[in-house]
Image (spheres, rainbow, N blue to C red):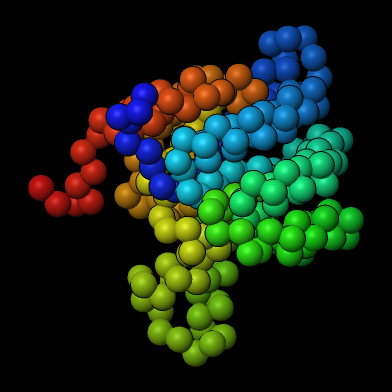
Amino acid sequence: MDNVKIPTHVGIIMDGNGRWANLKGKERSFGHKEGSANVERVVEYAFNRGVKSLTLYAFSTENWARPKKEVDELMRLLKIYFTKFIKKIANNGIRLKVIGDVSVLTPELKKVIEKGEAKTQNNLEHTLNIAINYGGRQEIVHAVNELLKDGKQITIESISKALYTADCGEPDLIIRTGGEFRLSNFLLYQGAYSELYFTDVLWPDFNGEQLEKAFAEYGARNRRFGKI
């Protein structure tokens, strides 16, 4: 384990909460609750193993199309998560950033997010990006519009610097749980040369052992970035 190459920046598409709950004869909301609890465990494990930045796909721009009851439950769980774990995050040198268009979130949730970001802004050891109302295409449009507003030239480099995750660098590894084989509008620009790892394990069951498997496969790959 100690010889495994650890990626600096990891993105995770946390998929499978609803199916996990259905397999246990429970409501989808039960799966989201368990998935939310698993975030803390995976974050702690990843940072203890040497990951510097972690970007988690919590709620996409497309997820608003889900039933209102499920969306409301997801928003409630997000508020609980941020409220409960801000102190722990702050005391462990973790900087919290919420990426995506938060303007449409409830005032209560936005207030909790702002408090968490402000409290952890000086933590430099680790960065935890939580993607809420996030879409990769929308992020690119946002970055370009910001550059145009500032009168800056549109280049590969300038767009990269205008993205939400600019100060974290591009993700070395993107993991998707739940058995699907697609990026679902996640880190499209940043992930141009990311290593992709897909697993059938549903998010509530994804743990340190599963993360080690992803790290092992990542370390075994030859990243050529288009070169020989």
Q: Residue at x 46, y 43 (%)?
A: 51
Q: Residue at x 34, y 40 (%)?
A: 195
| Along the line of sight, the residue nearer the viewer: 151 or 43 | 43
Vertical position of residue 150 compared to residue 69: above or below: below
Residue 44 spot, x, y in % from top left: 60, 36
Residue 104 in view (yes/no): no
Vertical position of residue 49 compared to residue 116: above or below: above
Residue 227 in view (yes/no): yes
Residue 211 spot, x, y in % from top left: 47, 27
Q: Residue furthest left?
A: 228
Q: Residue at x 21, y 38 (%)?
A: 222
Vertical position of residue 62 compared to residue 152: above or below: above
Residue 68 spot, x, y in % from top left: 84, 40
Q: Residue furthest right?
A: 108
87 sits left or right of 206 in the view: right
182 sits left or right of 130 in the view: left
Q: Quadrant of the N terminus?
A: top left
